[in-house]
Amino acid sequence: MADLTEELEDESSEEGESMTAAEVLQKLEEAWLNEKFSPDLLEIKNDIVDCMLEQIKEMEENIRRAKKGDFRVGIHKMEIDRIRYFISSYLRTRLQKIEKYTAHVLEQEKARGSDETPQMSPDEYTFAKEYSENMENHFKVLALRHMPPNLQALDPKHTVMRPNLDSYVFLRVNEDTAGVLVEEETAEAGEEVIDLEKGDQLIIRYRPVATLVESGAVGLI
Amino acid sequence: MFGEKALELIKELQRCLDGSLPPFNEEGVRQVLEEMKALFEQNQGDVSATVAGETGLFAGVQLRHAALERNKRCLLAYLYNRIQQIKKMRWEFGSVLPQDIRYNLSEQEVQWFNRYNKCLANYMRSIGEDGGLDLTQDIKPPKTLYIEVRCTTDHGEFETQDGNVLVLKKNSQHFLLRSECEHLIRQGILEHIVH
Amino acid sequence: MSMDPAEVEFLAEKTMVTVVPNFNQDKIYLIGGEIGPFSPSLPVDVPLWMALNLKQRQKCRIQPPEWMDVEALEEVKQKETDDKFFTAMPSNHYMEITQLLMKYAPEDIPRADQIRTLIKDIWDLRNAKLRSSIDVFVRSDVTHAKLNHLTPMEINTARPFLTRALDQMHMLRTNTQTGLKQTQE
């Protein structure tokens, strides 16, 4: 069985530094955990997904070429199953959020500046649009169009579901980060600012740390 | 009482909680829409009467409007939650629903289901560079469990996942991956030895 | 969002453990890194998922991790009893690893019964601590809490109740605040 190419070009990093497959796998695991525990939809990690699917494909080809009874085949298959689970579960979690918060994620995509990274992959976006049309059409045909004229529209204020960014999450600090604003100043109390130390684990509301999750300075656990 | 029919629909959803899906209540939906029509017409009447100079009708109009809003909300909630249930079944049973479930869907729900199938399939095909990925598989973390089995009949050769060839003879015992011999257990060719 | 205990176990299976193989095999190049080579009687580090698989195929003996030792665990238990904070565990997945090894390789673990009891005691001690700190946290008005040394399985056990309670409390608190503002205006 041929050995794997050790070094892989990571397309997402601008400095062009290369990552090993093992490092990309580690990134996939982190992306999976973050997506699982964050209330909102995070930026899609398409490079990681594509890279890992490519690795799986190569490995499956190697397996096909392997001799009958090769002891390593079972081991490689197990690893492939594990990685495929991470990818499927990651994309499934995202799809569930897209289905739940369809109007919200589409709104955000519309409001996004051309220089900002999209949250969704082009195919997720297509899915979101079709899903939203299908849902609206369903409401229209079965209910809305049979209602009095002044009630036929869907009021976004009442129907758009939005993630609760104030929900609590558990996190581990990956990089020292000073001056995280946890609570704005209110009538009764001053603002609350904390410093995060690498290695610390916290339970805290998601909103103040949302950008740190996206940047990787903290990871959800 | 206003909104009573709509509430019935909501109560019906309660019965979905165990994962089943009762038949689409077409009659219930029709009655709610009819009540809405009646409420709306009464309101229109009261509004024209007010314009013509009659007083004291405003509170009634407001009450009826609240009832209209409530009916609308319940009706949409009924439709939405049934769709959630149907969607769950797509992930459980695949793109073809069992006949007894399909029977309980309204015509329009079947159409929703078909469209959902299509956009889900398109999305799953798009994943990765080629071939796509079936997200309805790998629902649980993989576990490779080996189990001991006894052969109940002379079955012949069997190739294991790692390429070894075994001869499954009556009463022979083997140590196999559960996933690769599960179908033989179901067919009664192998039996699981539980110690 | 929540996590299934099976998923925490899945993560734990990535942990490296030492096995003593009974076969010869060159290095295996996994996507996650290279493993081996394997020679009979020569200890080698492999991920737990692979160790369990080899064990089931009777191709190796698993060496219990260093911490999985009666004396060492008694010390851990003592420290956990004495300290009012959570102490650092010798493994972030001590519970899952113990459960998996007890299930698939009990004959490879000396004094397995005692170890099982000690791990259960440590788990119970920490859970009692977790419950009382949750109690203090929820009663207080603080916005966040440090939970150092809590392991993923422990976090996962507390997660459903704790996050829901705190979410509700936050909602009530912000509602009273906006309510207050409105009365003042």
Image: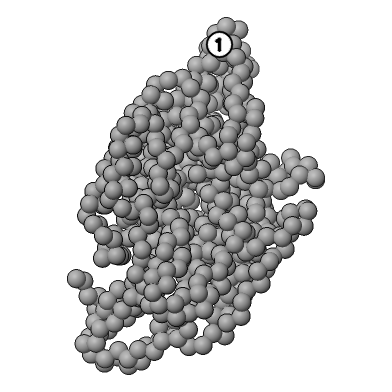
> What is the basis of the colouring in this image?
one colour
Q: Quadrant of residue A50?
A: bottom right
* Amino acid type indicated by mark 1: Glu
Residue located farthest toward the top when viewing the structure as drawn: C184
Residue at position x 32%, y 91% in the image: B167
Q: Position of residue C24 (x, y in %)?
A: 45, 80
Residue at position x 26%, y 79% in the image: B149
Q: Is residue A165 above or below residue C184?
A: below
Q: Is residue C47 above or below residue C69?
A: below
Q: Which residue is mark 1?
A: A188
Q: Is residue C47 above or below residue B61?
A: below
Left or right, C55 with respect to B62, comes to left
Residue B80 appears in the figure: yes
Residue C58 versus residue A61: which sits nearer the camera?
Answer: C58
Q: Position of residue A76 (x, y in %)?
A: 50, 73
Q: Is residue C32 above or below residue A92?
A: below
Residue located farthest toward the right when viewing the structure as drawn: A114
Q: Position of residue B121 (x, y in %)?
A: 58, 65
Element type where label 1 sits in the image:
loop
Numbered disc 1: what chain?
Answer: A
